[in-house]
Image (cartoon, helix red, strand yellow):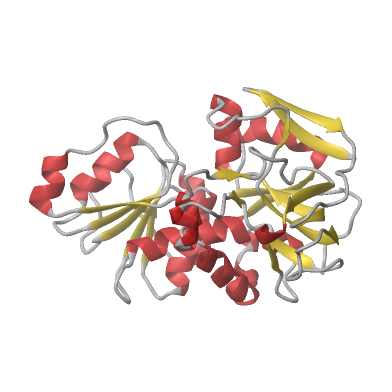
Amino acid sequence: MQSVRLHGIGDLRVEDIAVPAAPGPDEALIRVTMAGICGSDLHNFRTGAWITRAPSVAGHEFTGIVESVGAGVGHVAPGDRVIVDSRHVCGTCPACLSGRGQVCANLGFLGEVIDGGFAEATLVPGRNLLRAPEGVPDRHLAMAEPLAVALHALDRLAPPPGAPVLVAGCGPIGGLVALLAAEAGHAVTVLDTNAARAALVAEATGGHVADPGAPLPAGIEHAVDTTGHAAVIGKLAADLPGCGRLALVGIGRAGPVLDPLALVERELTILGCHAFTDADLAGIARRLPALSPRLDPFIAAEIPLSEVPAAYARHLAGEVGGLKTLILCPPEAPETP
């Protein structure tokens, strides 16, 4: 079968590999229908940040159809369309036992610690599967994982009803945070150095575009950073009023970013947001039928597996106009439904 495997930093290859073996206990074999390229995929490719095994089939955002299940998997069955949880958790550490798998002591992700979804088929733990809601097309089911990340960040931010929310960074997560905030009744302001992407997100969410170099608009006390850039985070923290709240979901470089004295004196709340919880993904699954009509503006392209390396290059060069590139796996399969 065709696959896209990461062999090392900057080394992504389209390769024919064997179809995975029959699922063992608590596993399921998935025929992948659609996958998505994530910013963390690009970060991993560019920096090697999470390369723990190689080669590995890349991709943690995907959907598909259950081909077969192993012993102990009873909540999904062959023929079911599924949403895939990208987290690979141990299930036994205190965080997992308390329902906080996003901070599992042994947390990894599909496409890194085990093969992911950039292939015609893949083997995953059965606990990583949820039945997909009826009537939602594959291209939107493949966006369930980033939607769960966005929901987790917005829930962590916890803006009061109707409070304005600012989103820094108009990549896929930023766009989806803005969408969920707008759906929840918040007035949304977005900012990005890429004016075209900021305009796209503002139009899709009914939001407003702010100048990245100007002070924050008056009245904004809640912000989400999806860029991970120290300068952006520092400016947001400096511009938010006293008692403001800032949720950080972007992936950047480790290092000093904020002045703790300023946090104390101005009572700022800084919130780390990592992946999502079981409840977040289940909540998105329930909401997808209603969200589905609003997701197409975020999709930049649908490509076959053979074009994934070229798509990585375009993304890293800043040559992609939209937010989310999706992969049809295999390319000849019609989308469902």
Asked where in the image residue 209 lies, by quadrant, the reply is bottom left
* Rendered location of residue 320, percent (x, y): 62, 40
Location of the N terminus by quadrant is: top right
Asked where in the image residue 233 lies, by quadrant, the reply is top left
Asked whether, in this view, residue 78 is left or right of residue 5, the answer is right
Q: Is residue 202 visible?
A: no
For the point 72% across and 33% down, which residue is it?
Answer: 56
For the point 8% across and 49% down, which residue is it?
Answer: 265
Residue extending farthest to the left is 265
For the point 19% across and 45% down, which residue is it?
Answer: 238
Q: In the image shown, does 10 or 307 lie closer to the viewer?
A: 10
Asked whether, in this view, residue 11 is left or right of residue 30, the answer is left
Location of the C terminus by quadrant is: bottom right
* Rendered location of residue 23, percent (x, y): 83, 52
Question: Compared with residue 10, is residue 158 higher up or lower down, i.e. above or below?
Answer: below
For the point 84% across and 31% down, which residue is it?
Answer: 15
Q: In the image shown, does 283 or 38 lie closer to the viewer?
A: 283
* Rendered location of residue 261, percent (x, y): 11, 41
Asked whether, in this view, residue 261 is left or right of residue 123, the answer is left
Question: Compared with residue 12, is residue 202 higher up or lower down, i.e. above or below?
Answer: below
Question: Compared with residue 136, is residue 106 higher up or lower down, i.e. above or below?
Answer: above
* Rendered location of residue 119, percent (x, y): 80, 43
Q: Is residue 52 visible?
A: yes
Q: How many marks?
A: 0
Asked whether, in this view, residue 144 is left or right of residue 209, the answer is right
